[in-house]
Amino acid sequence: MTGPTRFLLRIARWIAGRRRSDWVDAMEAEAASAGNGSTAWALGCVWAAAKDRFARNAWVLVAVLILAACAMYWKTKLFFATSDLLVHQRISPWFAIALWIASPLPIAFLLGLLRPRRSTYLMVAAIYLVIEFAPLLLLWVGAGISPLEFFSARQVNWYKADPGARVGPAVGLTCDLVVWLAGAWLGMHSRRAANRTAS
Amino acid sequence: MRTRRLSSQTHSVLSALANRPGDWLYGLELATLTGLKSGTLYPILIRLADRALLESRWLEPSERGRPPRHAYRISAGGLKALADSERLAESSLRELRT
């Protein structure tokens, strides 16, 4: 099995949870026999694990969509507020970008605080995926703009803070994910610390 | 239990298993027989196993160094569900014609 295959199967195991670990073992054993198609097989396993998990916990899907909508609203509000300041040169482009990158932190922190479980990371990752990729999908379906446009070599401005500061899509996406996960981690640790102090 | 009309993909998985009733089939074999990708196949297998429409077991690998593989076989309940679903589809078709 190749590295990407193993990595994808690890993600599938994480998504599927302990209750389905036997099934992930089954998928893994088939991936080991799939030869050249093992990575595509493993990618399908990630999709299968997500579908099964959401079918078992439908409320999670609803919560993810509601939270993603809230986070999107908050990010858009913040974006336009800071864009205005940026246009009038009251703040630097890097400061604006730092604010946009950090914007999901309060939501992720709150989620970690309210739900201090490992599965919260999964929830946070799902919200991140919806926020980052749903607009691209909508633009693709609604306006015919290919999602690949946003990842082309010409695209060096993930955060629209031209001129002055440029961040590529890979760096932008990674920063956003790190902030979401870090926010959840901080929330969970704050809750645990508070519980320890109380007991 | 209420007779359910199976989805076309679930039907194709059960049919593939019913065509070889005594054999244990692996996930990869089922994917080849049905043309389904792993992302579609496994949720169906999980659902069928939960409803006891198929049996599953771990088989020792034929090659050394490989992990044991999960294999599937249709159960009596699965055969009945398949027959019921086909009967239901036929009667719906007949109703449409008349």
Image (cartoon, coloured by chain):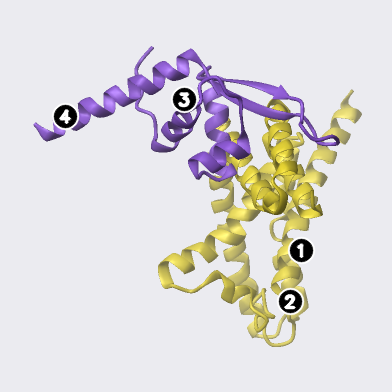
Please tell me which residue lies in front, A12 or B95.
B95
Label 2 vs 1, first from the N-terminus: 2
Instruction: For the residues labelled 2 and 1, say whether their Cβ atoms are less than 8 Å apart.
Output: yes
Task: Find the distance from the CA under tag 4 to the CA under tag 1.
Answer: 59 Å
Identity of the residue drawn at 78% across and 47% down:
A6
Residue B18 numbered tag:
3
- Residue B64: image quadrant is top right
Q: Nearer the viewer, mark 4 or mark 1?
A: 4
Q: Nearer the viewer, mark 3 or mark 2?
A: 3
Labels 3 and 2 positioned on one and the same chain: no
Task: Find the distance from the CA under tag 3 to the CA under tag 2.
Answer: 56 Å
Label 2 Cα neighbours within 10 Å, binned few <14 / some 14-19 / many ≥20: some
Task: Find the distance from the CA under tag 2 to the CA under tag 1.
Answer: 10 Å
Where residue B97 sits in the image (x, y, percent)? 12, 34
Where residue B75 sits in the image (x, y, percent)? 51, 16
Q: Nearer the viewer, mark 3 or mark 4?
A: 3
Where residue B43 sits in the image (x, y, percent)? 55, 34
Q: Secondary structure at mark 3?
A: helix
**Which chain's colour is purple?**
B
Q: Nearer the viewer, mark 2 or mark 4?
A: 4
Label 3 vs 4, first from the N-terminus: 3
Q: Which residue is mark 4?
A: B94
- Residue A117: image quadrant is top right
Instruction: For the residues labelled 4 and 1, say whether their Cβ atoms are less than 8 Å apart.
Output: no
Q: Secondary structure at mark 2?
A: loop
